[in-house]
Amino acid sequence: MFEMQLDLPMWQLVTAISIIFGAAVLRGYSGFGFSSLTVTSLALFMPPKIVVPAIFMLEIAASVHLLPGVLRQIDRKLLGQLLVGTLICTPIGVWLLAHLPEAQTRLLICTMVLICAILLLMGFEQKKEARRLPLATGFASGLANGAAAIGGLPVVLMMLYTQMSPIATRATLVAFFAFTDIYALIWTGHQSLLTGEVVSLGLIFLIPMVIGLSLGSFLFRRAGNRSFRNLALVLLISVSVIGLARSGYQLLG
C-alpha cells in the first residue's frame, strides 16, 4: 500500500498549493504557463529534483482534463514535427536534471524562463511563417522539458510567430504537453527520480490544480482580454530574477 512521504513546513505547503492553483488558472486559460510558473516558483524553496517530476505528473493530469474539449482544433501536422525533436532531446534534459547540482539546475530553470518570458512580453508574435522552425523548436523544447519541465515555452514562442488562431494554438499545446510530459515522466523514472515524496507531492497538488484548470477554462470561454497573459509574464519575469539572484548567491557562497 502506498504511504504518503512528505516532510514540508506548513508555510511551504500552503504557499505551494497557492502557486499550483494560480498557475492552473493560467494553464486552463492559455494552454501554457503551468510548468514555467510552478517550477520557477517552487524551486525557490524546494529541490528541483522533487519539484520537476511532480510537475510532470500534474501536467499529464491537466492534459487529460483539457484534451477531450480540444481534439478537433489540434494542428496535427505541426504537432508531429514538434514531437520528433522533443523525443530525441528529452532524455538529455532529464540526464542534466539528475546530475547537475541544485543551484545550477535552478539557475538553468530561471534563465530559460526569464528569456522566454521577456521575448513573449516584447510581442514576438504572428509576424511571419515558421515552416523551418518546428523541428529545431522540438529539440530546444526537449532539453527544456527534461531539465526543467518548461518545454512548452519554446513552442509557445514559435506558435506566436505563426498565423495560428488562439483556439488552435491552445489545442495544439494541450496535445503537445500530453505526449511530452508522459515521455519525460518515463525518463525521470529511469533516472530514479520518481520517489515516494514526489508522488505524495503530486497527489496533494492535484485538487487545487483541477479547480484552477476549470476556472481558467471558464475564463477562456468568456474570451478574457490580453492583459491576463501579460500579467502572468510579468510574474514569471519577477520570480525568475529572484531565482537567479538566489542561485548566484549559492554558487558564489
Image (cartoon, grey):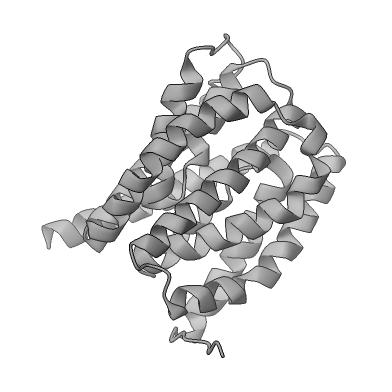
Going by the image, does 177 lie left or right of 250? Answer: right
Q: From this viewpoint, which residue is outermost toward the right?
A: 222
Up-down: is 86 above or below 149? above
> Could you tell me which residue is drawn at 45 percent across and 80 percent down?
196
Given residues 66 and 192, the one toward you in this image is 192
Up-down: is 90 above or below 9? above
Going by the image, does 193 lie left or right of 200? Answer: left
Q: From this viewpoint, which residue is outermost toward the top?
A: 128
> Could you tell me which residue is drawn at 12 percent across and 63 percent down?
253
x then y, percent, for residue 85:
44, 31
Task: State the quadrant of the N terminus.
Answer: bottom right
Up-down: is 15 above or below 89? below
Query: Which quadrant of the view contains residue 73?
Result: top right
Query: Which quadrant of the view contains residue 65?
Result: bottom right
Q: Is residue 25 visible?
A: no
Q: Is residue 153 visible?
A: yes
x then y, percent, for residue 122:
51, 25
> Could you tell me which residue is drawn at 57 percent across and 63 percent down?
19
x then y, percent, for residue 101:
21, 60
Given residues 198 and 16, the one toward you in this image is 198
Up-down: is 5 above or below 26? below
Going by the image, does 166 lie left or right of 120? Answer: right
x then y, percent, for residue 107:
28, 50
> Could you tell me which residue is drawn at 61 percent across and 43 percent down?
32
